[in-house]
């Protein structure tokens, strides 16, 4: 499993709109892609202008095989839905999940 980790900055008074539009547009679009497992929204109570998305993929190959034109079209739809509300991705990371076998734990 691979984790796509994205951090965004958005005005604190627009955070809920950002999350709702992301669910309606981005999450809905990603659900149609092979390998998509799920998505979570992480909020730090002390940073009202930040939103973190944690997206789980079955494999890196499935995640990275999403066509750029699909991503661009989805982003255009999202920008239109957000209207004048500004947002910016400020960090992105990729993580791999490592599972240990019982033998690794017992050593």
Image (spheres, rainbow, N blue to C red):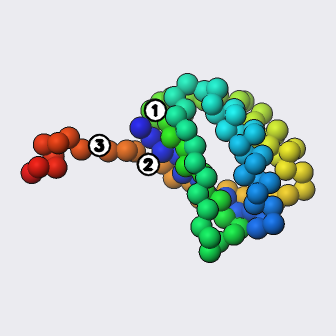
Label 3–label 1 contact, CB within 8 A: no
Asked which quadrant contains residue 11, the reply is bottom right
Nearer the observer: mark 3 or 2; the answer is 3
The residue carrying mark 3 is 99
Q: Position of residue 106 (x, y in %)?
A: 11, 49
Which residue in the protein does label 2 denote?
Answer: 95
According to the picture, the residue beneath numbered tag 1 turns out to be: 58
SS at circle 3:
loop
Q: Secondary structure at mark 2?
A: strand
Q: Give the residue drawn at x 76%, y 48%.
A: 20
Which circle's residue, 2 or 1, is located before the other in the chain? 1
Give percent across and percent down for residue 73.
Answer: 77, 33
Say if mark 3 contacts mark 2, CB within 8 Å.
no
**Which residue is rendered at x = 76% and y = 57% of the image?**
16
**Where 11 falls versus 80 (above or below)?**
below
In the image: residue 74, left or right of residue 99: right
User: CA–CA distance between discs 3 and 1?
Assistant: 14 Å
Q: Between marks 2 and 1, how big is the CA–CA gap?
A: 12 Å
């Amino acid at each position: 499993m691979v984790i796509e980790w994205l951090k965004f900055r958005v005005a604190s008074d627009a955070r809920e709109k950002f999350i709702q539009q992301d669910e309606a547009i981005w999450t809905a679009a990603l659900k149609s892609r092979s390998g998509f497992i799920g998505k979570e929204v992480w909020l730090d109570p002390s940073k009202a202008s930040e939103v973190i998305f944690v997206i789980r993929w079955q494999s890196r190959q499935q995640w990275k095989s999403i066509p750029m034109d699909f991503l661009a079209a989805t982003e255009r739809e999202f920008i239109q839905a957000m209207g004048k509300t500004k947002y910016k991705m400020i960090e992105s990371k990729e993580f791999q999940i490592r599972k240990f076998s019982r033998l690794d734990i017992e050593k």
